[in-house]
């Protein structure tokens, strides 16, 4: 069998490893996600940022319901599972009891934008000092690809087989734009992870968000435009071009609100 | 030719999604015919010219790729 890896002398040097696939903060365990799912990229980069900032012992994460319900299986930080949609409410409680900790939630669009809209908007409106990471793949992935509030116009899902009809169902809900108008929001950004450069920008934005949390002046909100190859009925490579052609015009990446200097 | 950089792909974590294949600027990663224990076709490195740009590792959703690059020799101090 052909080897994918050839040992070289220099590889044992301490600074030869330029990208560690499993930092201390990420548990070495195969992910349960479908091949090509961007949840894995998001998990990995969040944990890389936590490692780089050296805050592993002071971070508490709140896991949602959805595909990422097992987030606590992979993230080697203190985690708490919340009821469906209530991650922001649980994070509020944790932050108020332990103000010295850095609290983040990790939620999908079915969790944050459908059942948890009220909790999310009110948590941001109160200006809770938490970081909300919102992974938006425009579909309910876990339950079999049903229409989500963020589903694009004309997008086929198992509950909208002829495409989302704006007249009947309404427009895709842009949670990040909604949240950016609230005075309690401190840093609001939308990023994607479909290309290497997008991942680098996402990592930078996430690092900023974790640092802004220390100011204790409001909620940080990071949206990730993601894919769902199984739900979209595409190969992972096709899903990447779908993000570029369809998702990004609807959900343009960039900072929506940055702290005033 | 000695390699300047290389990637280590964890066979059992790879799910053959090919996101790294489209991310590699040298087109040096290919989907092989080998299967892992889960039955996924795995990706292997098929070039000697890997620069260690980390692109493949950044987009890998299953954290299967780690990247090694030859450390540069320390510059002699300017006198």
Image (spheres, coloured by chain):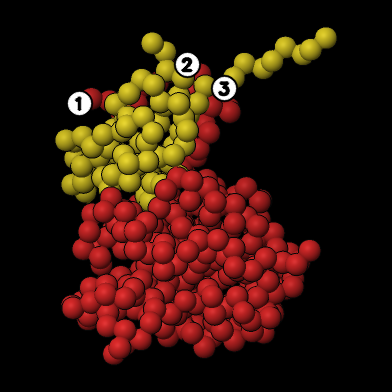
Quadrant where the N terminus of chain A is found in the figure:
top left
The CA span between labels 2 and 3 is 11 Å
Image side of residue A50 versus residue A12, left or right: right
Q: CA distance from mark 1 to mark 3?
A: 30 Å
Q: Nearer the viewer, mark 1 or mark 3?
A: 3
User: In percent of the image, x 21 and y 63: which residue is there?
Assistant: A233
Mark 2 closeness class: few <14, some 14–19, many ≥20 residues within 10 Å: few
Give SS at disc 2. Answer: helix
* Cα separation between marks 1 and 2: 23 Å
Mark 1 sits on what residue? A1
Numbered mark located on residue A9 in the image: 2
Percent position of residue A80, x then y:
52, 72
For image coordinates 21% across by 34% down, the residue present is B32
Task: From this view, report whether residue A175 is shown above or below residue A135.
Answer: below
Chain A: its colour in the image is red
Residue visible at 29% across and 90% down? A168
């Amino acid at each position: 069998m052909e080897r994918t890896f050839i040992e070289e002398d220099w590889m044992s040097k301490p600074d030869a490893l330029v990208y560690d696939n499993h930092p201390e903060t990420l548990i070495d365990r195969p992910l349960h996600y479908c091949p090509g799912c961007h949840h894995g990229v998001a998990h990995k980069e969040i944990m890389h940022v936590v490692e780089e900032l050296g805050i592993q012992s002071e971070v508490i994460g709140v896991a949602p319901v959805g595909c990422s319900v097992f987030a606590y299986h992979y993230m080697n930080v203190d985690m708490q599972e919340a009821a469906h949609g209530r991650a922001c409410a649980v994070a509020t409680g944790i932050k108020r009891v332990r103000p010295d900790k850095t609290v983040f939630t990790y939620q999908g669009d079915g969790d944050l934008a459908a059942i948890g809209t009220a909790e999310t908007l009110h948590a941001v409106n109160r200006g809770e000092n938490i970081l909300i990471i919102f992974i938006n793949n425009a579909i309910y992935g876990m339950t079999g690809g049903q229409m989500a509030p963020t589903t694009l116009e004309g997008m086929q899902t198992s509950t909208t087989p002829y495409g989302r009809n704006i007249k009947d169902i309404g427009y895709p809900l842009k949670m990040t734009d909604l949240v950016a108008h609230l005075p309690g929001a401190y840093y609001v950004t939308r990023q994607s992870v479909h290309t290497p450069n997008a991942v680098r920008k996402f990592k930078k934005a996430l690092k900023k968000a974790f640092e802004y949390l220390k100011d204790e002046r409001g909620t940080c909100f990071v949206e990730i435009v993601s894919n769902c190859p199984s739900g979209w009925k595409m190969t992972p490579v096709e899903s990447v071009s779908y993000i570029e052609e369809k998702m990004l015009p609807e959900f343009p990446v960039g900072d929506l609100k940055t702290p005033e200097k | 030719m000695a390699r300047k950089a290389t990637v280590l792909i964890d066979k059992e974590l790879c799910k053959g999604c090919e996101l790294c294949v489209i991310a590699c600027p040298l087109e040096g990663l290919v989907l092989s015919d080998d299967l892992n224990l889960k039955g996924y076709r795995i990706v292997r490195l098929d070039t000697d010219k890997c620069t260690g740009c980390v692109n493949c590792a950044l987009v890998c959703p299953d954290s299967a790729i780690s990247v090694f690059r030859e450390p540069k020799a320390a510059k002699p101090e300017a006198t």
